[in-house]
Image (spheres, helix red, strand yellow):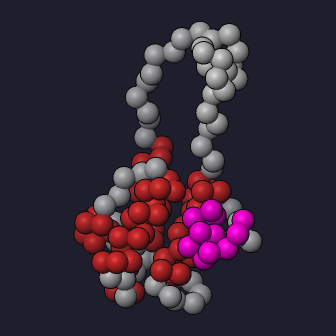
Amino acid sequence: MTVVEQVVEQVDEVVGKLLEMPGSVPRDVPLLDLGADSLVLIELADKIQHTFGVDITVVQLFEEIVTIEAITRWIEQERTLPAPAAPTAPTADAGEAEDGAPRPQAPAPIADQVNHLIAQLLEMPGSVP
């Protein structure tokens, strides 16, 4: 299973939980047609922003990014945009910053982040099986 397929599947689970829909949520049906309201979209936008670090607004979820498939494409698109180049300075050790402090870890893969999000929404400790 590719990372994109994992994201689609896990976003499907998050939306299903928010909409209180058992089973798989249709991925090509607008969320509003499935019963989502503004409160669900607010919570979904917040979870996406905090989990994936991508900016998505409730207005976008109402008007443009209206299906699970579209949400997944948005996450992938925003996560793969090149970051602005930062000047690099030589350091003594690749694991330490110039001041000797440890460098921050790279962000976890999308699938791990979505898994964590689902665990939080389902109020489950650890990760979702």
**Lateral position of residue 37 relative to residue 26, left or right:** left
100 to 116, vertically: above or below: above
- Residue bounds of the magenta highlight: 115-126
The residue at the point 61 percent across, 19 percent down is: 97
Residue 53 point in image, percent of width and height: 46, 50
The residue at the point 68 percent across, 10 percent down is: 92
Q: Quadrant of residue 123?
A: bottom right
Residue 51 point in image, percent of width and height: 51, 56
In the picture, the quarter occupied by the N terminus is bottom right
74 to 66, vertically: above or below: above
Q: 19 or 122, which lies in front?
A: 122
**Is residue 119 in view?**
yes
The residue at the point 30 percent across, 66 percent down is: 58
Q: Is residue 119 magenta?
A: yes
In the picture, the quarter occupied by the C terminus is bottom right
Q: Is residue 51 magenta?
A: no
Q: 45 or 99, which lies in front?
A: 99
**Is residue 30 in view?**
no
Q: Quadrant of residue 35?
A: bottom left
**Lateral position of residue 45 relative to residue 93, left or right:** left
